[in-house]
């Protein structure tokens, strides 16, 4: 009987782990990457006198990783 309870408990903990990982991924993807792009893009564009980034503000999904890091981190 104990083994059944522990097996069910282990399954529930694995399910909770998967849900938490998904929520963390969603928060990171939405808040840091998307919102960071829309905030950082005009700032970087202003300071580089409309030269960089060459992607438009709506092309954050097509931008290279380096461009994404520079725009979000600045």
Image (cartoon, rainbow, N blue to C red):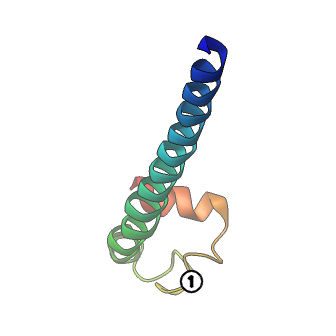
- Nearest the camera: 38 or 29? 29
**Quadrant of res 45:** bottom left
Q: Mark 1 points at which residue?
A: 59
**Residue 54 place in picture, x, y as percent:** 57, 81
Q: Nearer the viewer, residue 22 or 3?
A: 3
**Quarter occupied by the N terminus:** top right
- Residue beneath the point at 57% across and 82% down: 55
- The percent position of residue 6, horizontal first and vertical second, equals 59, 19
- Name the spot of residue 48 as percent of width and height, x first: 42, 72
Mark 1: secondary structure: loop
Residue 22 located left or right of residue 34: right
Left or right, 50 with reference to 56: left
For the residue pair 63 and 29, the one nearer the viewer reads as: 29
Residue lying at 65% horizontally and 60% vertically, measured from the top left: 65
20 vs 52: above or below: above
- Residue 19 x %, y %: 51, 48
How many residues crowd around disc 1 within 10 Å: few (fewer than 14), some, or many (20 or more)?
A: few
Q: Is residue 57 above or below residue 27?
A: below
The quadrant of the picture occupied by the C terminus is bottom left
State whether residue 32 is above or below residue 19. Answer: below
**Residue at the image position 53 percent from the left and 31 percent from the top:** 13
């Amino acid at each position: 009987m104990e083994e059944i309870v522990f097996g069910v408990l282990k399954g529930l903990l694995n399910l909770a782990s998967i849900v938490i990982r998904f929520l963390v991924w969603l928060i990171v993807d939405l808040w840091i990457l998307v919102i960071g792009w829309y905030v950082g893009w005009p700032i970087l564009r202003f300071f580089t006198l409309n030269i960089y980034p060459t992607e438009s503000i709506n092309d954050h999904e097509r931008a290279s990783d380096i461009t994404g890091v520079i725009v979000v981190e600045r």
